[in-house]
Image (cartoon, rainbow, N blue to C red):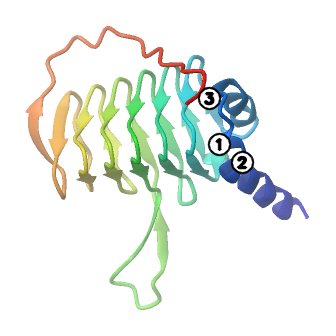
Amino acid sequence: MRTFLLHLINYLTREWIMFIPFHAVRIFFLRMQLAKLGEGTNFLMGIEIRVPKNVTIGDHCVINTRVLLDGRGGQIRIGNNVDIAHEAIIWTLEHDPQDDHYTAKGKNVVIDDYVWIASRATILPGVTIGRGAVIACNSVVTKDVPPMAIAAGVPAKIIGTRTSKLDYTLLHAPWFE
């Protein structure tokens, strides 16, 4: 019965709560489900979080529309002032293509402070993205990204370095998004 209730709560959150047009209402429900949710963090509408108890999010983060945070295979730990853009996907679970039985394997994902993940980027299991790194649009991150690096491509490779002192606080809190 407990498993059924957890699945029901996850379903209601994914299909109903995350589409309520008031971020304060979405935050209220997410605080009860996530492992940790920092102050000033905002979720826009239509986000999907699989196994919310495996997701930790720091202060002043912005999680944009149609982002998928998949905590089924491990922990997702997101630092402070992280901006995750529209339709980005963070996976902690994948199948082993070399396994005869198509076995699933999970690994944690760590996203450090001040990371910017651009639209439609995909982060695969076991990846750590260092402080201040930028992941370009449509990139697929298969390996760790060092701090302050700018990574792009499929698979993502380092194409530059960020030089900012990273002295900002994300404060995006729209009423109806």
Q: Quadrant of residue 175?
A: top right
Residue sitting at the far bottom = 100
Kindly state the secondary structure of the residue where label 2 is placed: loop
Of discs 2 and 3, which sits in the foreground?
A: 2
Residue sitting at the far right = 1
- In the rendered structure, are the residues bearing label 3 and label 1 in contact, judged by CB atoms less than 8 Å apart? no
Question: Which quadrant is home to the C terminus?
Answer: top right
Residue at 53% of width from left, 60% of height from top?
Answer: 73
Front residue of 65/74: it is: 65
Between discs 2 and 3, the one toward the N terminus: 2
Residue at 64% of width from left, 46% of height from top?
Answer: 52
How far separated are the C-alphas under marks 3 and 1?
Answer: 19 Å
Front residue of 60/106: it is: 60
x%, y% of residue 76? 50, 44
Pointer 2 residue = 16
Query: Which label sits on residue 34?
Result: none
Q: Amino acid at mark 2?
A: Trp
Pointer 3 residue = 37
Q: Amino acid at mark 3?
A: Leu
How far separated are the C-alphas under marks 2 and 3?
Answer: 20 Å
In the image, taking residue 7 as reference, residue 158 lies left or right, namely: left
- Mark 2: few, some, or many residues within 10 Å (few <14, many ≥20)? few
Query: Which label sits on residue 19?
Result: 1
x%, y% of residue 58? 52, 25
Of discs 3 and 1, which sits in the foreground?
A: 1
- In the rendered structure, are the residues bearing label 2 and label 1 in contact, judged by CB atoms less than 8 Å apart? yes
Residue at 45% of width from left, 57% of height from top?
Answer: 107
Q: Is residue 100 above or below residue 2?
A: below
